Amino acid sequence: MNNYNKSPSKSSTNASSMHTSSLATDLLVAKNIHKTYPQGSGRLHIIKGIDLTIKSNEALSIVGSSGAGKSTLIHILGTLDNPDEGQVLYKGKNLFQMNDEEMASFRNNSLGFVFQFHHLLSEFTAIENVLLPARIGDKDNLKSREKAEKLLVTVGLQDRMNHFPSQLSGGELQRVAIARALINDPEILFADEPTGNLDSHNAARIQDLFFELIKSLKITLVVVTHDLSFAQKFPRTLRMQDGRWVIGDKQNLIV
Ligand SMILES: Nc1ncnc2c1ncn2[C@@H]1O[C@H](COP(=O)(O)OP(=O)(O)OP(=O)(O)O)[C@@H](O)[C@H]1O
Ligand SMILES: [Mg+2]
């Protein structure tokens, strides 16, 4: 099992200011994010003023009880949902001031997503699924295919490239989803409970794969997980509770 870049000096969770290296640049900065959803005649306040600074090449885990707002937050950070209030800056650029086309292009080129359920398209093979974001992004066909093959080799699926999702195991499906998330060389990879649907053996393999990938690809990784042992392998872990950060030491995570 990997223990990615763990260092005692990198503990603690002041969400807005802590980072893995003082030399690293701010990649994604969220300021005072609020999110509400309609409920009856009123609104349910889900995200209650979240601040977060993510540095380039940082690896961050987010934990918290069910309903705390973790998925809502990473959807907002990944422009899959809008905040009611607050800003998300990517390299200083306010993401929610982009028009729909700019945002879609930004998402396609700069962000990768892995969810608890793989969301692969059943009528496409593994390699075709991996290639979809490249096709959407109008990338060179031949180069993308080579890259997709390479990524599928990296995730250990060299013998499964032409299998359809129905012919793959749960762990294999998730590895295809990871390869798909990486095809356009994202700068940030968001993963929302990527091992939540897997048995412990496959979960461990996927976890190891994430740490290998962030080392080899030098991407920034944000993982939401209920698995505390996985969360604690990250240099920085934040806990969410009722739409806010719980500020405390990393050791507080042992519950
Ligand atoms: N589209 C929506 N409309 C109304 N309420 C919503 C919507 N999406 C999420 N919520 C509510 O917001 C709260 C936070 O949801 P969210 O999915 O962010 O939680 P979570 O921390 O990811 O939980 P889990 O660990 O179970 O995945 C929940 O109470 C949920 O019911
Ligand atoms: Mg969730």
Image (tube, rainbow, N blue to C red):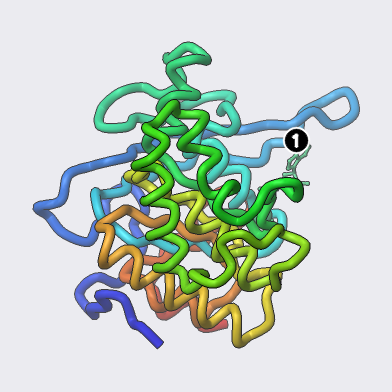
Horizontal relation, residue 186 to residue 160: left or right = left
Residue 130 x/y as whole percent: 53, 49
Give the crowd class for mark 1: few <14, some 14-19, many >=20 residues within 10 Å.
few
Q: Quadrant of the N terminus?
A: bottom left
Query: In the image, is residue 198 above or below residue 133?
Result: below
x 66%, y 64%: residue: 65
Callout count: 1
Q: SS for tag 1?
A: strand
Residue, disc 1: 44
Q: Is residue 171 left or right of residue 204?
A: right
**Front in this rendered view, residue 169 or 38:** 169
Q: Is residue 210 visible?
A: yes
Nearest the camera: 144 or 48?
144
Q: Is the residue 5 above or below the residue 93 in the image?
A: below
**Could you tell me if residue 31 is visible in this image?**
no
| Residue extending farthest top | 99
Q: Is residue 123 left or right of residue 190?
A: right
Residue at the limit of the structure toward the left, as seen here: 23
Dividing the picture into quadrants, the one containing residue 14 is bottom left
> Looking at the picture, which amino acid does disc 1 mark?
Leu
Residue at 46 percent of width and 32 percent of height = 107
Residue displayed at 39% across by 31% down: 139
Name the one closer to the observer, 50 or 157: 157
Assess mark 1: CB under 8 A from ligand 1? yes
155 or 231: nearer the viewer: 155
Q: Residue at x 15, y 51 (%)?
A: 24
The quarter of the displayed image where residue 222 is located: bottom left
Quarter of the rendering occupied by the C terminus: bottom right
Estimate the x, y position of residue 68 in percent, counting from the top left.
65, 54
* Residue 204 screen position, x and y as percent: 53, 82
